[in-house]
Image: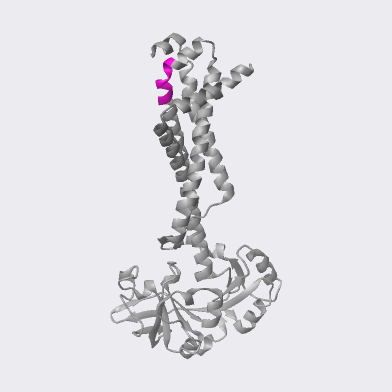
Amino acid sequence: MKHQLAIPFFLVSRWIKRGNKWTLSLIIFLMSIAFVNLVFVAALFNGIIESSNNQTINTYTSNIFMAPPDGDDAIKNTTEVLATIRTIPGVVAASAQMLVPASLKYQNKKGSWEVLAINPEDEASVTIVNTKMTSGSYLDENDDDQIILGRDIAGGHNGNSTSLSLDGVKVGDKITLTFDSQTKDFTVKGIFYAKFINTDQRAFITQKALHELNPSLDNLATSIIIKTTKKGNEPEVINQLKKTTLQGNFYTWEEVAGLMSSIADSFISINVILSTVAVLIAAVTIFIVIYIDLINKRQQIGILRAIGIRPYVIQTAYVLQSAIYSVSGVILGTGIFYGLLVPYFKAHPFSLPIGDASLIVNPADFTIRAEVIMWVAVVAGLIPAFLITRSKILEAIRGK
């Protein structure tokens, strides 16, 4: 019995030593590519989702979004509200925003976008829009006739949706803002590009400019965005906020994300589909390799069976061979992935409308995928070995 158990290891060692080294290298390389494909897809989608989440937080909603209480159009007494929010443990900063239902016009181009009145210093403490200026400069709290525009509003050669933009407005140009039957000319002080479509379709003015348009809106806000110490502690901070006398509704960035959340869910579904396809490709690859090898060794297998080697011993040998191919492929693939792909895409991330995405690997997910590729290879190697060893001994010896 012990002799029979040692035979598979002997057979595998002989096959590998006597086999064509180029063929062996090619098989291992194909297995490594199948594994890299499986891991790359997951890492890429993880990177896209993470980039989308970070862009939502850093340029759009921050960690927590406070809306007016039910039945009200605005949050009142924002000075006092902000002071209370800033005393909550886990809160880093907060900024009040007033959505101005206004239209913008430049020459013969006119459209409606989100125009927000802000305190520039407060806003810079909760988002990074102030660091994303591509031309001009960020707002100052004393600016009463200046405005900054997202690239998708400004338009031009480098802007998106040019037909739905102001078609090339530049820093220093005058645009007309119409609000509540009033019009006022603003000078474009800067244009920003956050690489996040929701943010790049926004414009910002100061609270001082809004006061000159409509003093009755002083100390009011349609939203307050709150930055916390870290992503993930939002529910804890919201619980603390609800224990205060603050009147309003609190939401995490995930609840406000809306379309971005749907996009992330779609990427997860696509990831599952493509991962399944990658596993099938790996299975088919190893199946074909083992099957061709078995066909070429058909007579040899017939002779082995004729001298008393049982079918399960031969099947075990091919399972071991498949395991060697898969383990070697996983090791090589890991080297290719971490040694070449991860550094490259870290230095040259994918540029997408929802942010720059690099490869993000979850160690547990990486381990699971390595195990999956190895088990799939073992099963894919066992099936043809099982089929071939079921044929009659004489037919196998004759090569039929």
Q: How many tags in the picture?
A: 0
Identify whether 265 is placed above or below 160.
above
- Kindly tell me whether residue 70 is visible in this rendering: no
Furthest residue in direction left, as rendered: 108
- For image coordinates 34% across by 68% down, the residue present is 161
Does the magenta portion include 350? no
Between residues 30 and 279, which one lies in front from this camera angle? 30
Q: Position of residue 367 (x, y in %)?
A: 57, 44
Rendering quarter of residue 151? bottom left
- For image coordinates 60% across by 64% down, the residue present is 231
Would you say the magenta stretch is mainly helix, strand or loop?
Answer: helix
Rendering quarter of residue 173? bottom left
Between residues 115 and 44, which one lies in front from this camera angle? 44
Q: Position of residue 245 (x, y in %)?
A: 69, 76
Between residues 341 and 69, which one lies in front from this camera angle? 341
Furthest residue in direction front, as rendered: 17
- Kindly tell me whether residue 113 is visible in this rendering: yes
Furthest residue in direction right, as rendered: 243
**Along the horizontal axis of the image, is 40 left or right of 67?**
left
Q: What range of the chain is rendered magenta?
A: 292-299
**Along the horizontal axis of the image, is 377 left or right of 83?**
left
- The quarter of the picture where the N terminus appears is top right
- The quarter of the picture where the C terminus appears is top left
**Along the horizontal axis of the image, is 221 left or right of 357?**
right
